[in-house]
Structures are given as structure tokens and as C-alpha cells.
Image: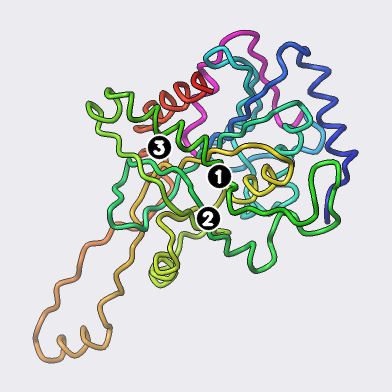
Amino acid sequence: MSISYEKYLEAADYLKSVISQNDLPEIAIICGSGLGGLADGLTGNVTTIHYSQIPGFVQSTVAGHAGELVFGEISGKKVVCMKGRFHCYEGYGVYQATFPVRVFKLLGVKTMIVTNAAGGLNPKYSVGDIMMLSDHLSLPGISGKNALIGPNIEEFGVRFVPVSDVYTPRLRELFAECYLKNKKISEDRKLNLHEGVYGWVMGPSYETRVECRALLSLGCDSVGMSTVPEAIVAKHCGLEVLAVSLITNEAVLSPEISSIEIAKAKLEGRTIERKVENFANHIEVMEVANKRAIDLQELVVDFIGSL
């Protein structure tokens, strides 16, 4: 079920009643798992509003997602940080999950920065690297979970919107410049920056081996459970988008050892060595996110200062 334009206006009007006209944001930041620390460093007239207070906002139920909008300044720019996003795997529809994006548009936001924790598919990627999204593969979108399905809201954008450049090239180039200039991060702290394709899956289960191999064969460099719906809605309503993944785990790509071969070896008195594999889990994802969060946050601050 889609959401009416009036519902978005109601949420925006409420926020405008709380935030002064001079403090309305031009930049929105959606903070992924473990990356909400950006909001803790805001300056100026900092205002925190819990999602439960905002008409139309649902609740974030994932560990590491505080469920708050925080308004303030970064590098002299008016921003709003979304500490905790909404995911479809929480039981929310794509309209609910992307609701804040259109509210940001009504507040005057022109640029949206999205961060997420993602699994690395590309064998050249390591845990702790970051990846700018240049494109995405939306498996749920292809199968009917596109956030623009339903009546088009003309006040936000046209019915058929091209998304070939959803991740704004100008912003990616600027972010890359900030990374290359910051030798402390790129060299001393050895933070590696990549640019690649993000595969969106619904979750909340992590992907199977064959799903990971399929995504890799389809051109995906990382995989995650968010970002794409918000990015498409942002593009629809004319926002520029920068999206960055923190690689928090390596996807398991190799097939399992054949159970038949193991059984045969057992009967013949032979042993087959099993490879020790590290499967993804949320605790380790959060640990990596917390370790690298400061570096990514510093880069985002530099980037905002250069806008």
C-alpha cells in the first residue's frame, strides 16, 4: 500500500515545527550498522528527535540502530543524521522503509549520503575496506519490491525515472579526492577504497554459497540488505546520492566438500580435511563496523566540507 503526499507533508511539517528555519538541513546522512557515530560529532544547534515522535516514521529494530534523527552541523553545513534505518526484512514495506527520504526532500535536503555494512564478494576486497557504490543489482526490485511501484506522486518526480546514474558521479569523484588527499587514512591507517557494484537482497538471513557465487557472476562486488530502496527514491525526487559500503565480512563462495566423498573416504578408512570457514554473523559485523567507523566518519566529514 502506497503512502499519500499528505502523509509526507505531515511529517515534514512536524519537523519544521521543532527545527528552526535556519537549521533545516541541506544534507541527509543515513547511518548504517555501527556507523551512527557521525551524529555524535554534530555541532551548532543540535536537536535529537526519536522516530516515535515523527508522524509516519516506524521503529528501527536492529541492534546498533538508535532510532533517532539528529539535526546539527558538519563542517559548517546543515545536516540531519538518521541513526538507524528501516529494512524490509523487519517486516516493513518499501514505502515505509523509504519514507524518511521524501520527508528529507520536503525539508530542503539536496544531497543524501548513505552508509551500510556489506559482505565482500570481490576476492580483491578485504574486511575493513570501503566501497563507493557505482551501480547496484536490485534482486527484490526486479522481482517486484521496487519502492516506486504504485501511484506516482508527481510532486516528487516523474513516473519513469532513469537510475543509471543513481549514485552521482560528481559526488563519487569528490569522495575519491578526499580519500586520496587524506594520507593518514589511506596510508597510515591502511584504509582501502574501492568502487563497485552492490547487490541488494532482502535478508535477514545471510546469503547461501550459491547465491554469493551467482551475485559475483552477475557483476556484484558486495552484497547487503539496504540502501537501494532509499537511493532509488532519492533519485526519483531529485536528490544527489553518495553511497558507501563498509566491508564487514567476506562472503563464503566455495562449494562444500561432497558428503558422498566424505562418506566414501570414511568407509575406506581415509580422512578428508575440512576447511575451516568463517560464516557471517551480526556480532562480528558490528565489531568490524565499530573498528573502522572512525575512519569512514572522518572521510565523510572531509567530503561534506568539500561540497
Q: Amino acid at mark 1?
A: Tyr
* Residue 258 in picture, x, y percent from top left: 26, 82
Residue that numbered label 3 is attached to: 289
Question: Residues at badges 2 and 1 in contact (C-beta under 8 Å)?
Answer: yes
C-alpha distance separating marks 1 and 3: 22 Å
Q: Which residue carries the number 2 mark?
A: 136
Q: Which circle's residue, 2 or 1, is located before the other in the chain?
A: 2
Type of amino acid under label 3:
Ala
N-terminal-most mark, 1 or 3: 1
Where residue 288 appears, x then y in whole percent?
Answer: 36, 39
Is 17 situated left or right of 203 in this image? right
Q: Position of residue 278 (x, y in %)?
A: 29, 57
In this picture, is 10 found above or below 46? below
Real-space Cα separation, disc 2 to disc 3, in angstroms: 21 Å
The N terminus lies in which quarter of the figure? bottom right
| Residue ID at (37%, 58%) | 121
Residue that badge 1 annotates = 167
Residue at (32, 24) in percent of width and height: 182
Query: For the point 44% across and 21% down, which residue is it?
Result: 302
**The image quarter in which residue 74 lies:** top right
| Image: magenta residue range | 33-53
* Residue at (46% x, 54% y) in the render: 197
Mark 1 surroundings within 10 Å by alpha-carbon count, few (fewer than 14), some (14 through 19), many (20 or more): many
Q: Where is residue 24, by image quadrant?
A: top right
The CA distance from mark 2 to mark 1 is 9 Å
Image mark for residue 27? none
